[in-house]
Amino acid sequence: MTNPYIVLPVIFQLFTAILLLFFWSHKNIQKAISITFSLVSLSIALWLFSLTWSQGIQTIQAGGWKAPFGITFVADVFSAIMVLLTSVCGFAVSIYAIGSLRNVLVKFGFFPILHFLLMGLNGAFLTGDIFNLYVWFEVIIIASFVLITLGGEKIQIEGAVKYVTMNLLASVIFLTSIAILYGLTGSLNMADLSLKVAELENKKLVNITAVLFFIGFGIKSAIFPLYFWLPASYHAPPPAVSAIFAGLLTKVGIYAMLRVFTLIFIPDEFMRELISWVAVFTILSGGLGALIKNNLREVFNYLIICHIGFMLAGLSLFTEIALTGAVFYLIHDILVKTNIYMIGGLIFKIEGTYNMKQLGGFYKSYPKLSLLMAIPLFSLIGLPPLSGFWAKIFLIESGFDVKHYELIGAILLGSFITLITIAKIWSEVFWKEMEELPARINMRYFHELRPIKQYTLVFPIIFLALISLFIGFGAEYVIRVSQHIAGELINSSYYIEAVLGPNTIQSP
């Protein structure tokens, strides 16, 4: 169904970013605009999700050129839920930034660049053109590079160099893959590519192209062994920036994998085996990295990597049950990872350090905050009935169905390592007695902030924790959405006919 309004999430974020540029030196106006417009953006995302859920896949052909010749935007339930999650996290981070960011960083342009980043993410989720997916990835890289260097500290520059170098390499590989694919098929429209790639006789060349796409997306998703840029860079920027990075930037790579490898390159036995072993080593390397770290943000960095492996496991199993688990885990992980980085930033604001050896006594001093923080931390483990539990059930069930026992073992071991890691955090940060710390120069602690700033640090954590609780205790609703998405991913004919027109796929 054609609907020109499905690009509103992209256009509205662009409008917000441009409007904020006019108030570059007025930090309070920027904050008010960002929060207000983020709330409106959240309303638009809810409308789009409701539209796709009730009326099916929506499309628009830019410039009036019919697919596959024009630039296509497609909104199905999968892309709509990703836009909705982007808006939820963007709204939370825009509030959190008020209390966590120094005013000088606001004057450097945090808010307009944040909305340019959200625009790029929404564009990547809604595009139906493989080349424009690359274009939106570049918008994301440019905006994220500015955010990661915000403030210009040495650690940020070092992290940015590693981040940008690897992401530019991923872009080169991605663009090369697109060029090969265009040479093979003469098309860039993803729905059209689905039909034309299936007709190609040279399956070896198709597999090589698929592997190149997997490597390009894999670098962006921080999979084994291409993940080392993430722990070297995500600890560098301010907590508000790390939160949006942790929640969304690696997940756009996972979204691209799920979209491309269910629509264009249907994984054969070789690709499934490749993805499954990468998933196993991603889980283990990320989990073991988290175990040996004593800095909160570094622990969280490696947990991102570990849990990327769970979503890869769902793709490698490639059953409707497995994809249901992968999509459910994707929804859960975006919210929880955003939240735990905000929690890390709040702990730093209160105690002045991320070093767990120097922390302690947090529960004694802040019992209510500690219980609030326990929700996303224990959701991360997947303790029943919290949000991380249900997705693993689907992944393990699918693993037994196809007798992929090494994946089951990796998922269980990864969950156990996460349990030990969170138990270590809880013991070191919340339960043990705290050591006396030297005063940090030029830092305003939480108790020194005005009440309104204290609320802006705590409210986003409450907001995302409540959504995580809903996902856990109201799992039947999220399961229904995830099953719907998995069904459309497995049966791509709905997507293809929505873009190219009815009766596009001829019955044999």
Image (cartoon, rainbow, N blue to C red):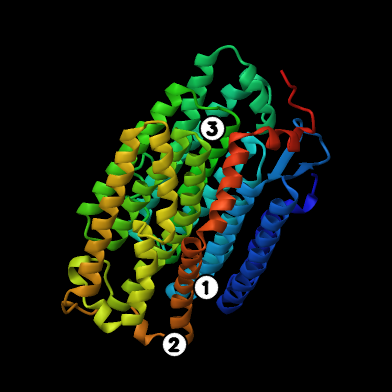
How far, Cα to Cα, is label 1 from label 3? 36 Å
Name which residue type carries label 1: Ile
Closer to the N terminus: mark 1 or mark 3? 1
Asked if residue 80 lies left or right of residue 147, the reply is right
Q: Is residue 76 visible?
A: yes
Label 2 crowd (10 A; few <14 / some 14-19 / many >=20): few
Q: Residue at x 31, y 37 (%)?
A: 281
How far, Cα to Cα, is label 2 from label 3? 50 Å
Q: Mark 1 near mark 2, Cβ–Cβ under 8 Å?
A: no
**Which residue is farthest top?**
201
Residue on which the image places disc 1: 95
Residue on which the image places disc 2: 450
Q: Residue at x 83, y 40 (%)?
A: 64
Closer to the N terminus: mark 1 or mark 2? 1
- Position of residue 31 measured from the top left corner of the image (x, y, whole percent): 57, 74
Label 1 crowd (10 A; few <14 / some 14-19 / many >=20): many
Of 483 and 440, nearer the camera is 483
Which quarter of the rendering shows the C terminus? Answer: top right
Q: Residue at x 59, y 38 (%)?
A: 489
Of 506 and 242, nearer the camera is 506
Dot 2 lies on which element? loop
Q: Mark 2 near mark 3, Cβ–Cβ under 8 Å?
A: no
Closer to the N terminus: mark 2 or mark 3? 3
Label 3 crowd (10 A; few <14 / some 14-19 / many >=20): many
Dot 1 lies on which element? helix
Residue on which the image places disc 3: 261
- Position of residue 7 measured from the top left corner of the image (x, y, whole percent): 72, 52
Name which residue type carries label 3: Phe
